Image (tube, grey):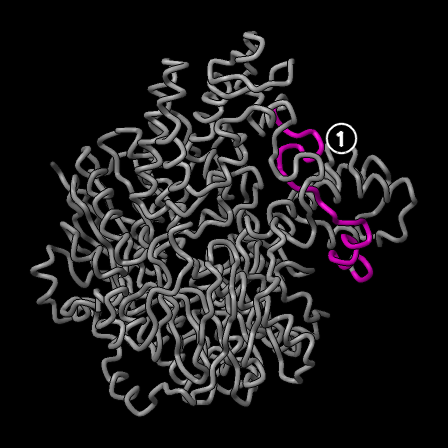
């Protein structure tokens, strides 16, 4: 089988990269963060494979210049990368993605127990035991919340109702300061222009200066001119993303379906109640009731067999803790990819190239082996599987290893190694191979010596959570030592997020609000999307020891921005300073430019692409993106780009990596110091103007951490992080752990939810939940230092150290 041959690839930071990738193999691409792994896998291989397929079927438009000399041997590619899952469709969920809800709808339609007109309930053949009448089956569509026949008409199948008011919307969009065009979301602007033409108003007017009739049309829409309206748009978006702007539907009580379908049950559960249970619980449910249903309706045997097989596959992929009603926007990148993997195992396609982006992210060591087996199963079906990975276990399992590096950004983009594992272990130029020499990596072995001087004793201050019962937690009491690095471990669904994100964080927020502690407290939304609809009951749960804290910083993996105009530079607060330097140049003053002219989403932005640098159109189900022909992708108006600061215009500055910008602004501490913090935690490769939509959850969390570290604090802060090393190589994780250890050295406490063995191994204390996910979890099965967990018989993670 001919390999995929790439010659002189020059895309992004690739440095005339040439290599051969064998087909029909399990291939891992690794390297330090920012080295060019994703560029090779997704921006080059995936996009080129897709482009050639689309061209073959006559659907591909004219593309830009090919930034390589040759690529041969490529076949159609299928890929899922973590950056593409940031969506907010409230109807997209596990059950629709896997099609399991569709199968269940068929079972409930034909084999459900109906309410007879005589008041009794039928059996599975829909015959009433009292009056012997058979009830007519509802159509499958009646159980589908996406269908007009099945959805609850009050909430239109979302299960919740927006509570956003007009006043709140106007305040949130800053209409007291902004013109109507600036305050309007980008996706509404085309329709707004049509509305302005029909109603004869100026887009630069203030909302409050518009006539009442125009205000109402602006807020509620006018479909005759193709304008949706601000309120319908915001409510639709916020139903999927904003817990503060929605409440459970009072008609269906969150079930999403109409009353008629809610009357149909199996073993007392309607389809929504069953869909809310974990996949493990559903597997047990169908095992218990399958025979009764198939005895009554034999034609459902194959359907039920398919349901049970898919549930088993999803469980093998570490997804048993999910429910069918779990919204896909709330899934981690790893969870969504494993969902994707399950669906493609069902398809039995062959001859394709599958590309995954860290599919084992968020998995316990015990669960990773099953995912690797499934990836190899996809390969054994006759496909090529390429995985961008940092996990040492996945790297060890690869048939072929490619390392891109040696550094990040301009220091990366070169081939460090290609070959099998045996040769890789002897590669002296690799920054990753040395970590493969031991069972759990070699990160920070010196910390074990350091810990001996900081033992955790009975007198060590503790933060205590008493009687935690959130979700699957079994009334547990947990002690968190303060002034230490503490890890929370456990299999997927064991209760880690329930304990920390859904219990500790809300309780801390309440305590700090009540106690009026003067220290700065930074609290972020930390609940997953399905939790946002629930009123989490903390009655009986208590917190002790918070008086020993001087503040709390919760650093989540939520995006630093949801649009292309959000950037790392703007998030950490240096973009205003950069624009200020440009605005104060003499050449700027002569042109009459102000600070706003150096912002691409304000007056200085390209009018053709609205400062995005690209134009996007959807045609026949395909989304095509091309560089803006007016600004050439630079986002700014041409006269703004004529202004130079030390030989660089504003677009060139935003293209700089963090490391490059540190040197460029070496004398400007307001800019260089925040950048030094980013570089310190392994983010030196990040571009200042990189769109937030291209930044992974792990990267977003580290940017937030750098921002938090930049604040002046005197110690006593509790930092809470969720998988902070997600997306980092062992070398980069070591740098981040240096920073977290430094926080502890300066009198702070660090609490991390983590799966990475090399990170857990250097924690001062580990709290392990389990033993399994869902209802079989929610207990503390072990706690202590890593050495102590290795001796505790109930510990699972301790066996891997």
| Residue at 60% across, 56% down | 536
Please name the predominant secondary structure of the magenta segment in the image. Answer: loop
Q: Which of 504/522 is in front? A: 504
Q: How crowded is the residue under tag 1: few (<14 C-alpha within 10 Å), some, or many (20+)? A: few
x and y, in percent, of residue 3 in the image: 15, 42
Q: Residue furthest front?
A: 130
- The quarter of the displayed image where residue 118 is located: top right
Element type at marker 1?
Answer: helix
| Residue at 52% across, 19% down | 140
Q: Residue furthest bottom?
A: 453
Is 577 placed left or right of 392 in the picture? right
Is 211 placed left or right of 387 in the picture? right
| Residue at 40% across, 79% down | 740
Q: Which of 447/509 is in front? A: 509
| Residue at 66% across, 74% down | 583
Is 199 placed left or right of 428 in the picture? right
Q: Can residue 370 be seen from the camera position used here? A: yes
Q: Range of the magenta residues?
A: 150-177
Q: Is residue 218 magenta?
A: no
Residue 523, above or below 617: below
x and y, in percent, of residue 790 in the image: 22, 71
- The quarter of the displayed image where residue 225 is located: top right
Q: Can residue 655 be seen from the camera position used here? A: no
Q: Which of 575/514 is in front? A: 514
> Which residue is denoted by mark 1 in the rendering?
223
Q: Which of 493/35 is in front? A: 493
Q: Quadrant of the N terminus?
A: top left
x and y, in percent, of residue 51 in the image: 36, 36
Q: Quadrant of the C terminus?
A: bottom left
Q: Is residue 171 magenta?
A: yes
């Amino acid at each position: 089988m001919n390999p995929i041959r790439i010659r002189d690839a020059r895309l992004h930071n690739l440095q005339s990269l040439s290599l051969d990738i064998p087909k029909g193999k399990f291939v891992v691409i690794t390297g330090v963060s920012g080295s060019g792994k994703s560029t090779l896998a997704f921006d080059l291989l995936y996009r080129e494979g897709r482009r050639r397929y689309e061209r073959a079927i006559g659907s591909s438009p004219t593309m830009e210049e090919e930034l390589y000399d040759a690529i041969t041997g490529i076949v159609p590619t299928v890929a899922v990368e973590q950056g593409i899952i940031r969506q907010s469709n409230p109807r997209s969920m596990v059950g629709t993605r896997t099609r399991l809800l569709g199968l269940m709808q068929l079972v409930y339609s034909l084999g459900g127990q109906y309410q007879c007109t005589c008041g009794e309930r039928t059996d599975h053949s829909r015959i009433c035991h009292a009056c012997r009448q058979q009830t007519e089956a509802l159509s499958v569509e009646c159980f589908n919340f996406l269908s007009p026949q099945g959805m609850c008409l009050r909430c239109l199948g979302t299960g919740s109702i927006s509570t956003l008011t007009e006043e709140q919307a106007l305040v949130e969009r800053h209409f007291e300061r902004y013109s109507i065009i600036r305050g309007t979301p980008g996706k509404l602007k085309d329709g707004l222009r049509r509305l302005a033409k029909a109603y004869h108003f100026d887009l630069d007017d203030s909302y409050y200066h518009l006539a009442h009739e125009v205000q109402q049309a602006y807020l509620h829409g006018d479909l005759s001119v193709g304008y949706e309206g601000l309120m319908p748009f915001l409510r639709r978006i916020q139903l999927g993303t904003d817990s503060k702007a929605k409440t459970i539907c009072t008609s269906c009580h969150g079930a999403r379906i109409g009353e008629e379908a809610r009357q149909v049950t199996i073993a007392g559960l309607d389809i929504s109640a069953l869909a809310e249970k974990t996949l493990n619980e559903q597997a047990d449910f169908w095992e218990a009731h399958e025979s009764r249903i198939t005895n009554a309706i034999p034609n459902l045997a194959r359907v039920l067999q398919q349901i049970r097989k898919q549930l088993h596959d999803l469980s093998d992929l570490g997804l048993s803790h999910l429910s069918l009603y779990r919204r896909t926007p709330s899934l981690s990148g790893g969870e969504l990819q494993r969902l994707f993997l399950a669906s493609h195992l069902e398809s039995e396609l062959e001859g394709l190239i599958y590309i995954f982006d860290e599919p084992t992210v968020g998995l316990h060591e015990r669960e990773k082996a099953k995912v690797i087996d499934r990836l190899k199963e996809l390969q054994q079906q006759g496909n090529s599987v390429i995985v961008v990975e940092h996990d040492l276990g996945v790297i060890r399992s690869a048939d072929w290893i490619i390392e891109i590096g040696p550094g990040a950004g301009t220091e990366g983009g070169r081939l460090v190694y290609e070959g099998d594992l045996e040769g890789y272990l002897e590669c002296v130029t690799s920054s990753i191979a040395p970590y493969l020499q031991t069972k759990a990596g070699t990160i920070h072995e010196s910390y074990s010596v350091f810990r001996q001087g900081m033992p955790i004793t009975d007198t060590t201050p503790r933060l205590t959570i008493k009687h935690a019962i959130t979700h699957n937690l079994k009334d547990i009491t947990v002690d968190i030592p303060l002034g230490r690095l503490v890890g929370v471990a456990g299999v997927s669904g064991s209760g880690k997020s329930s304990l920390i994100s859904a219990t500790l964080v809300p309780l801390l927020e309440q305590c700090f609000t009540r106690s009026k502690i003067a220290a700065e407290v930074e609290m972020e939304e930390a609940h997953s999307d399905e939790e946002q609809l629930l009123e989490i009951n903390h009655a009986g749960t208590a917190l002790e020891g918070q008086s020993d804290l001087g503040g709390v910083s919760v650093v989540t993996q939520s995006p630093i921005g949801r649009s292309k105009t959000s950037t790392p530079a703007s998030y950490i607060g240096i973009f205003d300073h950069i624009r200020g330097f440009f605005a104060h140049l003499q050449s700027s003053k002569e042109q009459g430019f102000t600070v706003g002219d150096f912002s691409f989403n304000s007056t200085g932005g390209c009018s053709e692409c609205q400062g995005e640098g690209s134009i996007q159109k959807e045609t026949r189900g395909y989304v095509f993106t091309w560089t803006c022909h007016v600004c050439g992708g630079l986002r700014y108006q041409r006269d703004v780009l004529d202004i130079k600061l030390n030989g660089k215009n504003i677009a060139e500055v935003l293209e700089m990596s963090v490391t490059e910008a540190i040197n460029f602004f070496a004398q400007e501490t307001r800019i260089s110091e925040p950048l030094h913090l980013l570089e310190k935690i392994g983010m030196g490769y990040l571009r200042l103007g990189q769109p937030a939509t291209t930044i992974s959850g792990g990267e977003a969390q580290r940017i937030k951490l750098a921002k938090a570290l930049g604040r002046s604090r005197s110690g006593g802060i509790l930092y809470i992080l969720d998988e902070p090393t997600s997306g980092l190589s062992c070398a980069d994780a070591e740098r981040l752990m240096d920073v977290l250890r430094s926080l502890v050295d300066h009198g702070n406490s660090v609490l991390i939810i983590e799966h990475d063995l090399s990170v857990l191994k250097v924690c001062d204390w580990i709290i392990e939940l389990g033993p399994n996910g869902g209802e079989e979890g929610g207990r503390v099965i072990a706690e202590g230092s890593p050495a102590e967990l290795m001796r505790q018989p109930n510990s699972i993670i301790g066996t891997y150290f």
